[in-house]
Amino acid sequence: MKLRLLAVALLALAAPTCSLRMAAGAKKSKAKKGPAVRKSGGGFGAKPKSAPVVLGRRLEEPQYEALYAWLGEASADLGKVAVADFDGLRGVMATEDIAKGETIVSIPGPCAVDLGTDHFDPVGPAQRLLDAMERDASTRAAYWATLPPADSPDLCTPDFFSESELELLQWPPLVASVNQKSAALRKALGDDADADALRRLRWATWLVLSRVLTVRGPDNAGHKLMIPFVDMFNHKAGVKHYLSGRTDGQLKVVAGEAVAAGEQVFIVYGTETTSAAELLAHYGFVAPGTAAADRQLVMAHADAIPALRATTAQDDAARLAADPPPPLKEELALRFRVALKRARDACVATGVLEEGA
């Protein structure tokens, strides 16, 4: 996720996903349970500008109430938001109007899970995460309970695709990256590792890639943190909210623009250079706002462009519009390759790539 940071920088090996809030010692205010407006179509991240605003319905399951209580005891400030359902998508809802410049949430640094200062390689932090889950099973139980389990349908990055599903991507560089990560996991576990150990490490690596933020510590190093509640904000390109803080202080999401009560509060995953390939690889979705980065991607991998010719963009669009819709992983592959084909066509139209690329 891209959060613009003061003393905080996004994890270089990943880019992050979901929210909550309550002032310490204060009672949680009941959020208005307005009916959700139906949104058009599926999809991830931002909706088309013509789509109606989807209002949230506060989720009151025990795991969220336990999270509020645990963070409240640690003096977290969660009073303006709550975990909510937005027409089937979990996210963070404003429970009152939030003005530009106000703190949306504030989480004490010690509540975060510090996974070290590794750069680029997510396997080491993933192994430390599994150790922390065992070591802090009771003290962080409220947080662990909000994370998607190892058998969750949310695990829809290409790392969890079958070989036939990987072929649907039509992009050899991404397939090669998946295979490299798989090899790195096996190497980390050794030859004697069983299937369950591999499954758990792959799951933990996904949690790291999809949730970790790099935050400056008192040692001036960038620490890889999993920040409870902050990792429940969903992505939307162009929003202006940002994260500030240090590991030894309060980690705050600050409003870069106004948010009305009942609306979802988004953040941005990645940066202006985050492509559809990175969003899919790290988070398991494809969203608007990556066109410029996608053009750079296809130009950097011109040798991979022929693989996109296996189907036409018109074929892909027709399959996406089919009734019933395609299975989730096929839908993701379709959205991904449509994004790259649009980028390819844009490069051809501007003369950057030759006709027929």
Image (cartoon, helix red, strand yellow):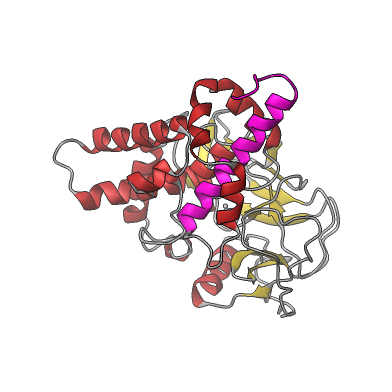
Q: Residue at x 43, y 61 (%)?
A: 153
Q: How many marks?
A: 0
Q: Residue at x 65, y 29 (%)?
A: 295
x and y percent of residue 154 in the render?
47, 58
The chief SS type of the magenta part is helix
Q: Which residues are magenta?
A: 328-357
x and y percent of residue 146 in the render?
48, 64
Quick check: can you spot residue 86?
Answer: yes
Left or right, 99 with respect to 286, comes to right
Q: Quadrant of the N terminus?
A: top right
User: Relative to 133, is 14 above or below?
Assistant: above
x and y percent of residue 159 in the render?
39, 44
x and y percent of residue 103 in the render?
76, 54
Front residue of 105/52: it is 52
Q: Quadrant of the C terminus?
A: top right
Front residue of 286/220: it is 286
- Does 338 appear in magenta? yes
Quick check: can you spot residue 16?
Answer: no
Q: Residue at x 39, y 31 (%)?
A: 176
Specify the quadrant of the image occupied by residue 312: top right
User: Relative to 222, is 160 above or below?
Assistant: below
- Does 265 appear in magenta? no
Left or right, 341 with respect to 49, comes to left
